[in-house]
Image (tube, rainbow, N blue to C red):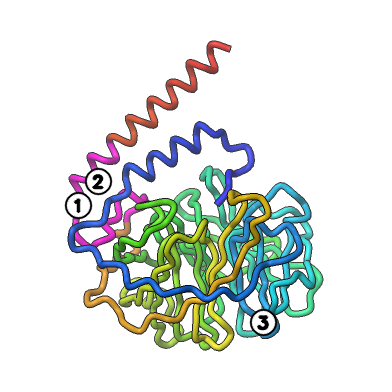
Amino acid sequence: MRRGRGTPRWLEAAAAVVVAVTAVPAPAGATPSPTPVTAAPVCEVRGGPLTEISGMVATDDGFVVVNDGVDDEDGRRIFFLDSGCSVVRTVPYPSPPRDTEDLAVGADGTVWVADIGDNGRSRKTIAVWKLPPGAGRPVLYRMTYPDGPHDAEALLLTGDGRPLIVTKYSAALYAPTAALRSRTTVPLAMVGQVRLPATTTSNPFSGIGRTAVTGAATAPDGRRVVLRTYADAFEFDVADGDVVAALTSGVPRVTALPDEPQGESITYSRDGRSLLTVSETANQPAGTRPGILRYPLTAAAPSTAPQATPASDAPAAAGDIDRGGVPVPLVVAGAAGLALVVVGLLVVTRIRRTGSR
């Protein structure tokens, strides 16, 4: 999560107010958080300007990570780590990425970099970069949303190798309508929406932290996928490679990831037996190194499934989502109205200040 280039601070604050006010609190029947398990430290990342890690995948001999969008050229690279988390190789981009947020790895070993972050909701296109095994440079593939800009931080690959983007605050699913082609912008289509169970897991961002989707991963065997928030991991079983069906109608198993400083990355271990996470450390005390953590998979699933939302009926904003599966139109309408008032006051204040200079 980063501030988009050129995005005014006051506008970001206004957007944050909208998200915070319109987010529906967990209802009385919310799924309680599972009993937290103790995360096992794997290793601390050493070498390179890796304080804003936003995406990670495990490989046979270590890990691949990317920073969140950064202005420092040395940080705008794809970093390869060994099993002890030391940087052993970096791959630069042929042109500066906008806001890299997640990683995925294909069955053939191709690394996919999701250049999909858009805090200011201002991008005309988003992109993925594909780095085949042994290649010295990734190739850029552009895409565009059918309904305006979205902020997103999570990328999955479907059974047939297509990218699937999960938006951050509405958990909407978007997939390309045609095969990706270099130097061509491919339209996306909304193909579904995820309803994550509400939890009560402690995290630095409170309620918003339990609903914002910040990362995703596919198990090595392709039979499971996981979405993460700042607070929890939600693992879904995938049948016949149909990731969309799994996310929109499946019952997730919940693993609590309590109080990670700013957890935006998740991946499976190479044997598929555990989940691995890492947090950004840019806002932590000087000298703090990012540490990869290992969580055992959760065996038990919630007793009731969250209600799936068809793509044609899916709400577009985070405030329209009822995370507990109980309709709350009046609450949402009131919250949205209050949010608009707050944003209006911020805009007026900004205009007055600007006019007085």
Task: Tell me if residue 291 comes above or below residue 295 in the rendering.
Answer: above
Q: In this orientation, does residue 84 appear?
A: yes
Magenta part of the chain: 315-337
Disc with the residue nearer the chain's start (1 vs 3): 3
The residue singled out by tag 3 in the image is 109
Cα gap from disc 1 to disc 3, whole angstroms = 44 Å
Identify the residue position indicated by label 1 in the image: 328
Dot 2 surroundings within 10 Å: few (below 14), some, or many (20 or more)?
A: many
Q: What label does residue 332 carry, if any?
A: 2
- Amino acid on which the number 3 mark rests in the picture: Gly
**Above or below — where is 235 with respect to 357?**
below
**Occupied quadrant, residue 64:** bottom right
> What crowding class fits label 3: few (fewer than 14 Cα within 10 Å), some (14-19), or many (20 or more)?
few
Q: Position of residue 21 (x, y in %)?
A: 33, 42
Disc 2 vs disc 1: Cβ atoms closer than 8 Å?
A: yes
Give x and y (percent) for residue 59.
65, 81
Say what amino acid the circle numbered 2 marks: Val
Which quadrant of the structure image shows residue 347?
top left
Q: Residue at x 73, y 53 (%)?
A: 96
Label 3's element? loop
Q: Secondary structure at mark 1?
A: loop
Residue 325 on the magenta segment: yes
| Side of 165 relative to 102 (left or right) | left
Q: Residue furthest top?
A: 356
Q: Is residue 47 toward the left or the right of residue 319 in the image?
A: right
| In this rendering, position of residue 256 left or right of residue 122 | left
